[in-house]
Amino acid sequence: MNLGILLLGVIGVIAVFSGQIANGLSIRMLLQPTAFIIVLGGTFCATILNFDKKTLLIAIQNAIGIFKREKSNTNEIIKEIMQLSIYARKKGLLALGNVLNEVNDNFLARGLQLVVDIGNPQLIYDILSSEISYEEEEELISSRVFEALGGYAPTFGLVGAVFGLINVLKDLTAIDTLGYGIATAFVSTLYGVGIANILFLPIAGNLKQRTREKILFKELILQGIVSICLQESPTILEEKLLAYTKSHDRGQI
């Protein structure tokens, strides 16, 4: 997600509300501070009780990060792995220790260090795949925070609506304002459903997508490390690595 997509989302929301206002919906009816406080206050309180402080801070940082465009370096890492594979076949696996300082990616450098120190492809795969699984679980926690926010918001929207109806129905003598009061009571439901589906759940989905891209990138590197350890043919290695890339990127490698 970048600022352009965010702008499109904002324009979409404005278009929806503009259409409803043009259809006769009162702006004053939509502006209900009490409903806003109930929905956001209840949603954030429930989420804070559900997650620890560290998780919440990381989730906020990751959510801010989705608005920054990240340049993919998949093609560059494949080229680097290919060069390392050719080097290892010519000089031997132990010679990789001489070029570790030139490797930019920390995960790749760690994997190559294991190749030099251990030299057992299955053991290396088990160690690094466990690290990837742990990292994936850590990354997914942020998306779960926003999924929780997206789940709580509509619930507290209903809570606000119930409070509003109780307040309206306690006095049925004011028939003239009864309809307006009931309509106003449901504004909190609109807030809850709207905030969940316009903000919280899209952020959760975006965080999940970014996590999957990070994990696929690590899995690509892991495949390269294991292949280097097995001293496989560069042609075979290239085909294995290309399987992790999108079809439209293949021609750029």
Image: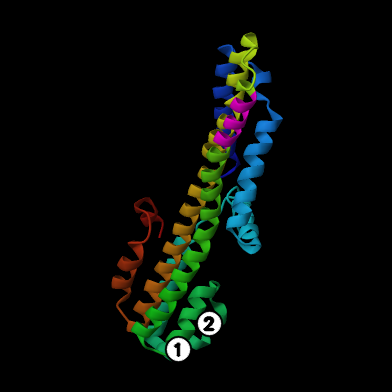
> Where does residue 89 sit, x and y in percent of width and height?
36, 84
Q: How is the image coloured?
A: rainbow
Q: Nearer the viewer, residue 87 or 140?
A: 140
**Crowding near the residue tagged with mark 1, few <14, some 14–19, many ≥20 C-alpha atoms within 10 Å:** some
Is residue 3 visible in the rendered structure shown here?
yes
Residue located at (47% from left, 74% from top): 131
Total number of numbered discs in the rendering: 2
* Residue 117 against residue 172 in the figure, above or below: below
Residue located at (58% from left, 39% from top): 156
Residue type highlighted by circle 2: Leu
Q: Which residue is mark 1?
A: 116
> Where does residue 202 sit, x and y in percent of width and height?
51, 43
Residues at circles 2 and 1 in contact by the CB criterion of under 8 Å: yes
Q: Which mark is residue 100?
A: 2
Q: Which image quarter is the N terminus in? A: top right
* Residue 52 against residue 169 in the figure, above or below: below
2 vs 1, front mark: 1
Question: For the view shown, which residue lies furthest in the right direction?
Answer: 33
Q: Nearer the viewer, residue 49 or 71?
A: 49
Q: Which image quarter is the C terminus in? A: bottom left
Q: Tell whether position 57 is magenta.
A: no
Residues drawn in magenta? 157-167
* Residue 20 against residue 213 in the figure, above or below: above
**Crowding near the residue tagged with mark 2, few <14, some 14–19, many ≥20 C-alpha atoms within 10 Å:** some
Which quadrant of the structure image shows residue 16? top right
> Where does residue 111 sit, x and y in percent of width and height?
46, 79
Residue located at (36% from left, 56% from top): 250
> Where does residue 26 sit, x and y in percent of width and height?
64, 16
Question: For the view shown, which residue lies furthest in the top direction?
Answer: 176
Q: In the visual, does 175 lie left or right of 155?
A: right
Residue type highlighted by circle 1: Val
